[in-house]
Image (cartoon, rainbow, N blue to C red):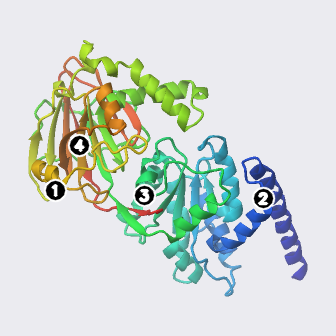
Amino acid sequence: MAKPSSEGDSSTASRTGSRSTMGESSLKGCGFSSFTGFRAEKEDVLRLAMPLYLRFAMLDCIKKKDVDAGDQHFQTSSSEDDPCENPVVVFINPKSGGRNGSVLQDRLQHIISQEQVFDLHNVKPDEFVRYGLGCLEKRAEKDNCAKETRKNIRVVVAGGDGTVGWVLGCLGVLHEKDQFPVPPVAIIPLGTGNDLARSFGWGGSFPFSRRSAIKRALQRATNGRICHLDSWHVVVQMPGGEVVDPPHSLKTTEVCDVDQNLKIEGRVPDKVNCYEGVFYNYFSIGMDAQVAYGFHHLRNEKPYLAQGPISNKIIYSGYSCSQGWFLTPCMSDPSLRGLNNILSIHIKRKNSSKWEPIEIPRSVRAIVALNLHSYGSGRNPWGNLKPDYLQKRGFVEAHVDDGILEIFGLKQGWHASFVMVELISAKHIAQASSIRLELSGGDWRDAFLQMDGEPWKQPMSKEYSTIVEIKRVPFPSVMVNGE
């Protein structure tokens, strides 16, 4: 038995040495020149690595999409295997963060372990939840390492707000199935806006040039305090036969869960199409969504124009000007007129079951329902309102877990620009625990909507109404505060 074990150790050592050599050369190219210090850093955070047999078992279950696929690895476990102190898994899109994303992935694999860092192109978050965590839960009663790992595991997402929302949505399934605890989520910000990361103390960008940045991020991920984030469920009910190209966060559903206690003002056809999704930061309708829609299509058609956060913002600003948002008072195009021509809003206030109508200012061309304090790369369009103003308007101080959304309006490009540089606040409309939007077409053929930066073109009907209803998900998302 000794000889095969020796050969296995030799093979493992060979693979590890090869991987280390590759990592050393690639890391030097990103400002990580001191590989000796990097190895010492690895020793400091070895407590993040799970026992080897657990890592292999989870990976086999995920790859084969079978919670029983890793059984053979538990047969080789030893009583000497102790659960790691702070187990983590990382989801990363190596194409994020400019050219540094793949280097970050390589370094994380060396610091933690290769089996605990998942490339999102190869391993989807829902596969990890169903098969990876399922593997641990299946063995938790008989294997102490599996039990403690499942209890203490945390998830780190290296990506933008869309990637973080994707992972949060997949973890939300654990709430629905009463599979607790739900792993809390930490963030390494690699996107353009990174508003979720900013709201929870992870900053607006990742400092790739600092050699200690990854180690510090992992320490904060494992030691940071747990906090909660409201999640918001969106239902879109539209006339049947209409075609819509929804974002990834919006899925078709056979059940239109629209509140029947509020009468729809327009006509509803016998056949309707329904979509549903979840957002964490904001939902908007109007000119801002139209600009975002055009920007996303331009970036997809000409990806060479978008090489990083700074170039994205420049292109986005330029596209805003080209769409006429700054000239809307002078334009005759119906799509540039006020939203009050096509839209009616009803809300429920907090601790109230009664729907009430809300007036839309004539000048407003974009309406945003905001959950976080951070919007558009760290801006706070709602503003830090004084107690006297809050009392006068019947508002309360905004928090990410208070069960209410802040609804505000943007008039046109100049107004939005002053709001985004925080010279003025947005047009305050209401605070609500539930929102009903009813759209009727008229001269408008399309409306533009977005949630958490994912826009889509919503076809309009002259005869029938389109309904959008927003309500809070009963359970919060679990986050790690990075401060």
Single out the mark in the foreground, 1 or 3: 3
Q: Amino acid at mark 3?
A: Phe
Q: Amino acid at mark 1?
A: Lys
Q: Nearer the viewer, mark 1 or mark 4?
A: 4
Among all residues in the image, which is located at the extreme right? 3
Q: Are marks 1 and 3 in contact (CB under 8 Å)?
A: no
Q: Amino acid at mark 4?
A: Ile
User: Residue 407 got which mark?
Assistant: 4
Closer to the chain start, of discs 1 and 4, is 1
Secondary structure under badge 3?
loop
Q: Is residue 364 above or below residue 134?
A: above
Residue 232, percent from left and from top: 30, 51
Crowd around label 2: few <14 · some 14–19 · many ≥20 (10 Å):
few
Q: Earlier in the sequence, mark 1 or mark 2?
A: 2
Q: Which residue is mark 3?
A: 200
Viewer-proximal residue among 89 and 70: 89
Tell me the number on the disc at residue 315: none
The numbered mark, 4 or 2, whose residue comes first in the sequence reads: 2
